[in-house]
Amino acid sequence: MSTTELSTATNGEGLNFMSTLEAANSAQSAQSAINGPFISFEGIDGAGKSTHIESLAQAFKDLGRQVLTTREPGGTELAEKIRQLVLNDPMDAMTEALLVFAARRDHIQHCIEPALAKGQVVLCDRFTDATFAYQGGGRGFDWAVLTQLEAWVQTRAPDLTLWFDLSPQIAAERLAGARVPDKFESQPVAFFEKVVAGYAQRERADPQRLVRVDALGERDTVWARVLKTVQSRGFL
């Protein structure tokens, strides 16, 4: 099936999918009080999300909670192998998307869901929003196809997503010389401007779940914003 055919096939299912997603999110919110929460962290490299994952993990541990920190692509042995392919090997946007969603399927089944079932807090460095931002926004891949893949693969959405929003120019300055860049980090600023626009589109579509965090400022200032958001949801 071509990309155009797959995109067309999704249109008739869109309303049903959105109704199903809304019902699932409602049930999931009640369940998250028992097991979880599941919080994802999003943003371009250099926005500082990894630092605040560690801080939030410690905040939950200080309350006696068990915490799983994980990442995407990755989190399982299979998904980590796929990660290396996606970050380093040349391929088109559809191949990237298919591989990322395959890794996500394994990650959800063998890492995220089992941890939540045990009552653990799950903090994930990137999740599905990143696929929409990077492959959909940055690569310009068909948004409807990504939506269909999300419906097929994703059995659990985050209870909260923190999007660390930072100017691509400032993020690039922070990363300069920090490490050898992968194929995405090597992209020009114009690419990351499209990625940021992709994140903004996801925020507009689901503002209750995806919350923008201003990532400009000193570490303690940004952490205070993160803490306030998480506390406002009753998770801390």
Image (cartoon, rainbow, N blue to C red):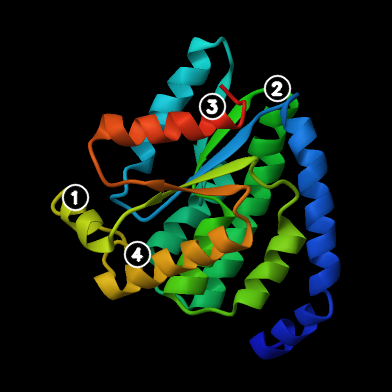
The residue sitting at 79% across, 54% down in the picture is 22
Q: Residue 231 carries which label?
A: 3
Tell which circle, 3 or 2, labels the residue nearer the N-terminal end: 2
Q: In which quarter of the image is the C terminus?
A: top right
Q: Do the numbered discs 4 and 2 sit on residues whose CB atoms are within 8 Å?
A: no
Measured in 3D between alpha carbons, the distance from the residue under mark 1 to the one under mark 3, in whole angstroms, is: 28 Å
Q: Which label lies toward us, 3 or 2?
A: 3
Judging by the rendered image, the residue that carries numbered circle 4 is 184
Q: Is residue 129 left or right of residue 165?
A: right
N-terminal of the two: label 1 or label 4? Answer: 1
Point out the tag, 1 or 3, that comes first from the N-terminus.
Answer: 1
Q: Which of 199 and 104 is in front in this view?
A: 199
Residue denoted by label 2: 119
Mark 4 to mark 2: distance in Å? 34 Å
Query: Viewer-proximal residue, 191 or 225?
Result: 225
Residue annotated with mark 1: 174
Residue 128 percent coordinates (x, y): 58, 56
